[in-house]
Image (spheres, rainbow, N blue to C red):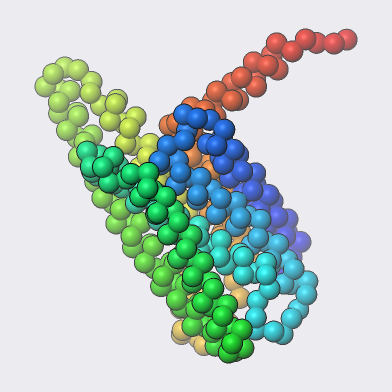
Amino acid sequence: MTTLFWIVAWFLSLLTAAGNGFIIWLVCNKRQLRTQTNAFVVSLAVADLCVGMTVVPSLFFTKSVDSPSPVPGKFEILSWFFMDSSVTNLCALVLDRYLAIVMPLKYLYLMTQRRVVRMICLSWATAFIFIATELCLLLILQTPLIYNVFFWLVIVLYKLLPCVMLVLCFASMLSLVHKHDKAAKTLARQLRFNHQANLQAREKPAVIMMGVVIAIFLVTCAIYFRCGFVILLDKKKCDDLKYKIPIVVFNSTINPFTYAFFKSDIKRECRRIFKFSKKDNDIRPAYP
């Protein structure tokens, strides 16, 4: 690993922790942000925060201490768990937005507070059960074969299936927004009044936010798919950590900035915070 790699990796790790930590603080501190949707946002932010705090440090310590044991260290296990939890929480968030956009009249009936809590708990529980099963088999069998088996399970369960689900949900949301946009333009021409603004404010930012998050996730998955094909076709080890780790961490880095730019309620609170900070600096008396 080169010096440039570690500089970029540690920078992204710190930026991930800071950005997601800010989102967690903002939602928990502002009463008006404590909504059902933002519960999924906070859960994903916690997972991404932990990804930033464990993935790069675990790789750093693994490279520093070369151990022949097939059983991974504590940091490495935690990084696996939080990366899988990030995927499951992302799927839960996209599913929530899908229901809100595609079935807005049934959304409040379907997404009760109890159901939201269950979905969040299930997102964490599935990742925990998967990692716990892998760790138990590693401790019992003590063979690297378990790595290969679970590598393919990760690709199928945490990469391929989520990719299919996220792409289908995003395509459905995008199609619905396009239909609403087209209907609003037709109605505006008939009534000579612009009814398009409210539709854009409610739906388009949510779809754009989901599009950015899903696109970064797909790039991350593409790296895993490439690695899987290399192992499958060439029968050799896939040594791609030099760009896999930065992309994986960047996937967790970009999420809080996406919320700040495209999620209307969080964007509004961010503007208020930074606007007040700017005013405080402007009225601060100047000392000679």
The quarter of the picture where the N terminus appears is bottom right
Q: Looking at the picture, how far across and down is residue 86, in whole percent? A: 50, 57
Looking at this view, is 47 or 118 the one in front? Answer: 118
Observer able to see residue 212: no
Q: Which residue is drawn at 48% across and 60% down?
A: 124
Numbered label tally:
0
Q: Which residue is drawn at 77% across and 10% down?
A: 285
Identify the image quadrant of residue 248: bottom right
**Residue 81 position (above or below residue 239):** above
> Would you say 73 lies left or right of 93 here?
right
> Would you say 217 lies left or right of 14 here?
left
Q: Which residue is drawn at 47% across and 33% down?
A: 33
Q: Looking at the picture, how far across and down is residue 40, in whole percent? A: 44, 47
Q: Residue at x 55, y 88 (%)?
A: 145
Quick one: which residue is furthest to the front in this view?
114
> Would you say 12 lies left or right of 114 here?
right
Identify the image quadrant of residue 263: top left
**Residue 162 position (above or below residue 269):** below
